[in-house]
Image: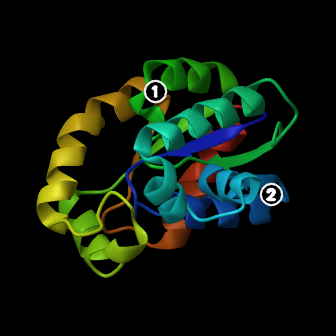
Amino acid sequence: MGRIILEGFMGSGKSTYGRILSGEFLLSFADTDKEIEKAEGCSINAIFEKHGEEYFRDLETSYLRKLCGSDICKDGVVSLGGGMPVREENRRLLRECGTVVYIRASRELLKERLRERSSKRPLLKGENVDEKVDSLMDAREELYLDAADHVLDIDGKEIYEVVNKLKMIYNRGR
């Protein structure tokens, strides 16, 4: 199959599931946010503060073009930043780049997870977390679905239940 790409809202567990899945199959793993931080030499928060969201979205698109046109994680797992599928170009690239799985969590679960970590998320800093999650999910849900080959609901599931479902999706595509 090659590349399996995990998309979803911030706090849905994409990076956690991706690391575990890649370890189980001994596949390469890339987290787009971490790759962008490494390339820029600073945190996502610092990028947002210094250059703004649009600049960061440009970096995401640039990284995605590079990823899709290369052997990076060609047989591996890629975890996307939560806003990556917002741009139409990114959704088109994702469809060409691998099998996209939308890791879908309920708003309630996301809010619970993000309330504790809002200071580490540039789009949540200084915001009412519940209202911001609702607003962003209203804007993004259809976009996630548009890019996805598979939707995996995670509410009420243990980590390894989710990883086992991802294994089945990966194995079907090989």
- Figure quadrant of the C terminus: top right
- Mark 1: secondary structure: helix
Checking the image for residue 25, the label placed there is: 2
Quarter of the view holding residue 137: top left
- Residue found 48% across the figure and 64% down from its top: 45
Mark found first going from the N terminus, 2 or 1? 2
Distance between mark 2 and mark 1 Cα atoms: 24 Å
Given residues 55 and 124, the one toward you in this image is 55
Coloring basis for residues: rainbow
Residue type for callout 1 = Ala
Q: Is residue 124 visible?
A: yes
- List x then y, in percent, for residue 32: 64, 49
Residue 174 is at least partly visible in this image? no
Is 113 in front, or is 150? Answer: 113
Residue drawn 38% across the image and 24% down it: 146
**Depth order, front residue of 28/50:** 50
Q: Residue at x 37, y 51 (%)?
A: 9
- How many residues crowd around disc 2 within 10 Å: few (fewer than 14), some, or many (20 or more)? few
Quadrant of image for the N terminus: top right
Give residue 10's position: percent from left, percent from top.
40, 58
Judge whether 20 appears above or below 70 on screen: below
